[in-house]
Image: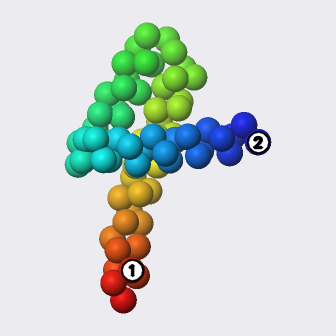
Amino acid sequence: MQEQNVQRNAQATAMSMIKLHGLRAQAVAMERTAELRQQGNAAGADLWQEIQAAIAELRRTAPAMEQSRRG
């Protein structure tokens, strides 16, 4: 149950990051991950790594979703 919440939160944050940062969203998330790891915050870094993955997935599937809406 908690893992599903983390995935949902990561996806929601990923969408917000894309809206806020556009093409730089994944780079910003990577920077945040590195900062947290350097600070010794493994849990926070893991969450931002999930956000990075969600951003990548949204980018990967977005063109296909746009084409299916038009078709």
Q: Position of residue 46 (x, y in %)?
A: 53, 30
Q: Which of 29 and 17 is in front in this view?
A: 17
Callout 1: 10 Å neighbours few (<14), some, many (20+)? few
Which residue in the rendered view is the most extreme toward the top? 39
Picture residue at 51% right of the left edge, 15% below the top: 41
Q: What residue type is labelled 1?
A: Arg
Q: At numbered mark 1, what does the secondary structure look like: helix, strand or loop?
A: helix
Picture residue at 30% right of the left edge, 47% below the top: 19
Q: What is the distance, in whole Å, between disc 2 and disc 1 at their CAs? A: 32 Å
Q: Position of residue 26 (x, y in %)?
A: 32, 42
Q: Which amino acid does label 2 sit on?
A: Met
Picture residue at 40% right of the left edge, 48% below the top: 15
Q: Position of residue 49 (x, y in %)?
A: 47, 36
Q: Quadrant of the C terminus?
A: bottom left
Question: What residue is pinned by disc 2?
Answer: 1
Q: Find residue 69 and name its label.
A: 1
